[in-house]
Amino acid sequence: MTRASRRVAVSALVALLCLAVAGLSSAGAAGLRLAGGASPYDSTGPRCSTGPAVVQPTGTVVAGRYTQVRVTGLTGTCSTGRVIVSTTTGTSTSTVVLDGTGTVTAGAFTATTATPFTPPSSSTGTVFVSVDTWPVPATWTFAPAGGGSCVVLGPNPSGATCAVSFGADTDGRADVYNIKATVTTTSANPVQWQATFDFANLTSFPFVARYVGEYAGNWALQPLPTGFCSGAARVVSYQGLPNRGTQHVSAASPLTLDFVGSLTSPVGNNVVYSCP
């Protein structure tokens, strides 16, 4: 075989190989699977959900700490969600306070942790959310209620703390609200408490009521200062009563105050203040 004919034969062989590879690519590529190695992506599914999602604390609050978060704003058909919540201090230190999963229903899911955590604020909290392993954009939102605070009175050898949490307005009228405030503590043993409320704080109350009362009545309201109604704040303090069994709270026995506020009518139930 001459040199020229050998070149022609090699060229023909290369052409046949290229045709064979092309045939495999068109006929068998759909059945190819990648397996093993550092990237075991042997199959993948289509993206099943999008955001943006919103993450915030939910569930029962004990001394300002939560064990659940709620993820909302999802769309699509994904079935399982995962959320990681971290709190950032300084410029680089980040601590995970919750890493949990939940079943996605109607575009939302709830994740739970066994370790109660104090939620970071909207500015110091970060979140990662994925659904069926697909990451989706998400934001963390939490603004600590500023309308109530609590201190433990008397001997407190365990260094326990107490806190106030607020429920939603269950009345809903434009001129009347009904809001429950719950006093909780980290102490397993009963501790004496004092809670302070600012009824002019609009993060906890829907408006500054002219009249406020409290339904339960098992508390001792501290005297209001002179000029109370002319000030910008509406700060009052409560303690429990020994003869009503409300002087102490414990982790197992929180206490709830039931406030009603009105813009137009005096409140007859255990008056907190009246500013006509």
Image (spheres, helix red, strand yellow):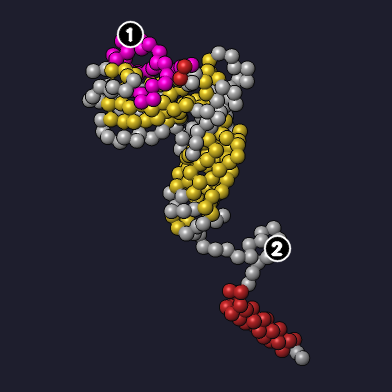
Residue 226 - label: 1
Q: Is residue 235 magenta?
A: yes
Q: Mark 2 vs mark 1: which is more N-terminal?
A: 2
**In this rendering, would 211 be left or right of 258?**
left
- How far apart are labels 2 and 1 at the CA level? 77 Å
Return the x and y of residue 77 as percentages of the image width and height: 47, 59
Q: Is residue 162 visible?
A: no
Residue 36 disc label: 2
Tell me the tag on residue 215.
none
SS for callout 1: loop
Q: Please, what is the three-letter code of the amino acid marked with disc 1?
A: Thr
Residue at image position (28%, 22%) is 268
Image position, residue 166 (x, y; %) = 42, 30
Q: Which residue is the extreme one toward the right?
A: 1
* Image-based side of 126 in relation to 13, left or right: left
In this view, the residue farthest toward the front is: 243
Q: Residues within 10 Å of mark 1 (few under 14, many from 20)?
A: few
Extent of the magenta region: 213-242
At 25% across and 30% down in the image, what residue appears? 175
User: Hey, what amino acid is under mark 2?
Assistant: Gly
Q: Quadrant of residue 265?
A: top left
Residue in the foreground of this view, choosing between 262 and 244: 244
Quadrant containing the C terminus is top left
